[in-house]
Image (cartoon, rainbow, N blue to C red):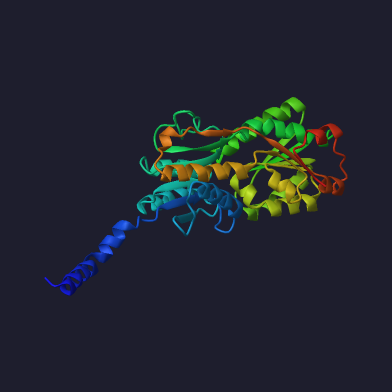
Amino acid sequence: MRRREFITLIGSAAATLGPGIARAQQPTMPVIGYLGNQRSQDPGPRLADIRGGLSETGYVEGRNLAIEYRFAEYRLERLPALAADLVHRRVALIVAPSTPSALAAKAETDSIPIVFQIAGDPVRTGLVASLNRPGGNLTGISNLFTEAAGKRLELLKEVVPAVLSMALLTNLTNPVFAEPEASALQAAARILGVRLLVLSASHPSEFEGAFATIARDGAGALLIGGETVFFSGRDQLVALAARYKIPTMYPSIAHTVDGGLMSYGTRFSEAFRQVGVYAGRILNGEKPADLPVQLITKMELGINMKAAKELGLTIPPTLLARADEVIE
């Protein structure tokens, strides 16, 4: 066979087999699912933190990773169908940034890995068998927000010691989280001799009505719950608290930075970054059952001095000395 004929023959074979060979040489881009409670326009910061954690393990959305987003628009009853859709899509992994989304995903699959971020005890809620040995297909990050609920009320009482009636704005459509939070705050309120009015909001459109009720009831201070809707709608909450001139304790420093009076809670940016890290590690071959649930126990106190001045409040020096962040 002549050399030119031989080269032509190889070229023809490569042309015939080329696409298949190319596909074999280029690994399929993994696709993960994000199952959120909120609206599609709301979760910007937490998604940025998750992406940051993924990048630490070598995954960048749009480059070597795709993400399928599903949002319940604050209608928790939609989560099972959205979870089923992601399972049908056969995603490589599901990120569940709340207890309701984690429970919905767990109910739909026992094989696709699920990485959660929840405020509470994942063993008590039935997500994992134990913290050190999760077992099954779930692992993730948990913070002790509910366990610190009573401390939030105590700190607020230090700023408004004369107040004997406070309100809690929570989301009772999420009883797995709201009921333990309300119970812990009721217990703390009884010890401090404070009456606690419990109100519910499951959507930002309900915030205005809740504040009007608080004003009519005469509550002298307010605690904002730790459910997803109160993070996504924090600008609106801060504005309403300023308009109604009610001293308010928020669930994260992000609220205080945005103008809220004070906050006590987990730095959630770190929690969601760790979710991204765990997701990347699982994509790289580790198993959820072998990754212990991480507990974020550090709580941070934030105080906004401008907000205190506008409310005519004097922050005790002892409280300022304990603050992790003071916004002037």
The answer to whether residue 168 is seen in the rendering is yes
Q: Residue 121 at x, y = what percent? A: 54, 32
Q: Quadrant of residue 157?
A: top right
Question: Is 210 situated left or right of 118 in this image?
Answer: right
Q: In which quadrant will I find the N terminus?
A: bottom left
Q: Quadrant of residue 73?
A: bottom right
User: Image height check: is 164 above or below 207?
Assistant: above
Question: Is 202 situated left or right of 8 in this image?
Answer: right
Give the residue at x 22% y 65%.
Answer: 17
Q: Residue 289 at x, y = what percent? A: 41, 34
Closest to the observer, 197 or 289: 289
Q: Residue furthest top?
A: 191
The answer to whether residue 78 is seen in the rendering is no
User: Image height check: is 258 above or below 266?
Assistant: below
Question: Is 82 situated left or right of 318 in this image?
Answer: left
Q: Residue furthest front?
A: 3
Closest to the observer, 240 or 71: 71
Question: Is 307 situated left or right of 269 in this image?
Answer: right
Q: Residue 97 at x, y = what percent? A: 53, 45
Closest to the observer, 143 or 205: 143
Give the residue at x 42% y 51%.
Answer: 81
Number of marks in the rendered image: 0
Q: Residue 290 at x, y = what percent? A: 42, 33
